[in-house]
Image (cartoon, grey):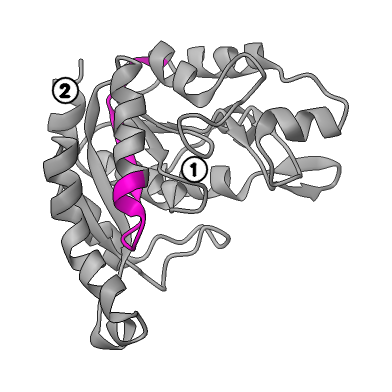
């Protein structure tokens, strides 16, 4: 299938927001786009069923009518790596459920945006990690990074891991960039300089492109399944159709 695999340099960098915004942008560009999150942790329990807020947000962004348990086939209450969360509940990780849900997408969309759990080296089961799924899906990889000190190392390591696995790195999205002088004033002088210079360092040292600098949009809420206008605007500046076509 055509599409993109969205991963991050770490947990909490905003992969869900960026994946949802990309799916929305592709839909608006005329691509029937579906979303997929193989494994979701930190789910809430509702009437005996585990519900992933990430899956709800992705479905809302993509205007998807698919069942949430198809979008996120593996769901765990504990906010842990899937293999650890499964072990603590006495379950086995049902990898076949992931493959089956993904196969159902064939012929139902023009493109799929897959959001990985954690980073590339996060284990889904003891034997299958996020990087292995990315290799099997063979989609161009979009890396979501944070803007501040330390992100050069984390991002270059993720780029190296992806390329070592034979994955095509489409580029990097730097998320939650400060948007006004007040936000900048709350940063230390060194961190403020780092956030200004990190994107160019990542592009140069990682031999990749910075696809977007996405602002910290306070109107965006994964919990409420709301995508703010500032995130949408930043993501819409990228020609995602060209990127997924180049990755075929």
Q: Secondary structure at mark 2?
A: helix
* Residue 141 lies in the magenta-colored region: yes
What x and y, as percent, mark residue 161?
36, 26
Q: Which tag, 2 or 1, sits closer to the chain's start?
A: 1
Q: Secondary structure at mark 1?
A: helix
Regarding residue 110, the answer to whether it shows in the image is: no
Instruction: Using the image, tell me which numbered label, if any, was put on residue 35.
Output: none
Tell me the residue at 46%/61% (across/down).
226
Tell me if mark 1 has few (under 14), some (14-19) or many (20+) residues whose alpha carbon lies within 10 angstroms of its own.
Answer: many
Is there a contact, CB below 8 Å, between mark 2 and mark 1?
A: no
| For discs 2 and 1, the disc positioned in front in the rendered view | 2
Q: Is residue 225 visible?
A: yes
**Vertical comparison of 96 with 148: above or below:** above
Q: Is residue 142 magenta?
A: yes
Residue 139: x, y in percent? 32, 21
Does residue 161 sit above or below 192 in this rendering? above
Q: Is residue 241 left or right of residue 44?
A: left
Residue at image point 81% right, 28% down? 87
Relative to residue 222, is residue 144 drawn left or right? left
Span colored in magenta: 137-153
Q: Considering only vertical position in the picture, is 136 above or below 115?
A: above
Provide the residue designation for mark 1: 59
The quarter of the picture where residue 188 lies is: bottom left
Q: Position of residue 35 (x, y in %)?
A: 44, 34
Task: Determine the residue positioned at 27% across, 67% down.
Answer: 230
**Residue ID for mark 2:** 245
Quadrant of the frame with the N terminus: top left
Q: Residues within 10 Å of mark 2 (few under 14, many from 20)?
A: few
Q: Closest to the observer: 117 or 29?
A: 117
Q: CA distance from mark 2 to mark 1?
A: 23 Å
């Amino acid at each position: 299938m055509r599409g993109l695999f969205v991963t991050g340099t770490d947990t909490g960098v905003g992969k869900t927001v960026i994946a949802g915004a990309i799916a929305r942008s592709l839909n608006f560009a005329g691509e029937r786009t579906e979303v997929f999150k193989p494994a979701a942790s930190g789910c809430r329990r509702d009437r005996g069923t585990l519900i992933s807020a990430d899956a709800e947000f992705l479905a809302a962004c993509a205007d998807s009518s698919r069942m949430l348990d198809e979008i996120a086939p593996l769901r765990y209450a504990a906010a842990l790596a899937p293999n650890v969360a499964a072990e603590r509940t006495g379950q086995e990780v049902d990898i076949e459920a992931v493959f089956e849900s993904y196969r159902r997408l064939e012929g139902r969309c023009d493109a799929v945006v897959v959001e990985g759990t954690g980073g590339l080296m996060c284990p889904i089961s003891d034997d299958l990690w996020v990087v292995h799924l990315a290799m099997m899906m063979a989609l161009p990889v979009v890396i979501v990074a944070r803007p501040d000190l330390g992100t050069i190392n984390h991002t270059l390591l993720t780029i190296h891991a992806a390329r070592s696995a034979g994955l095509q790195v489409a580029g990097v999205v730097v998320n939650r960039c400060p948007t006004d002088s007040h936000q900048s004033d709350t940063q230390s002088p060194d961190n403020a300089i780092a956030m200004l210079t990190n994107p160019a360092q990542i592009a140069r040292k990682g031999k990749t492109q910075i696809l977007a600098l996405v602002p910290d949009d306070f109107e965006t809420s994964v919990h409420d399944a709301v995508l703010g206008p500032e995130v949408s605007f930043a993501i819409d500046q990228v020609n995602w159709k060209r990127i997924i076509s180049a990755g075929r």
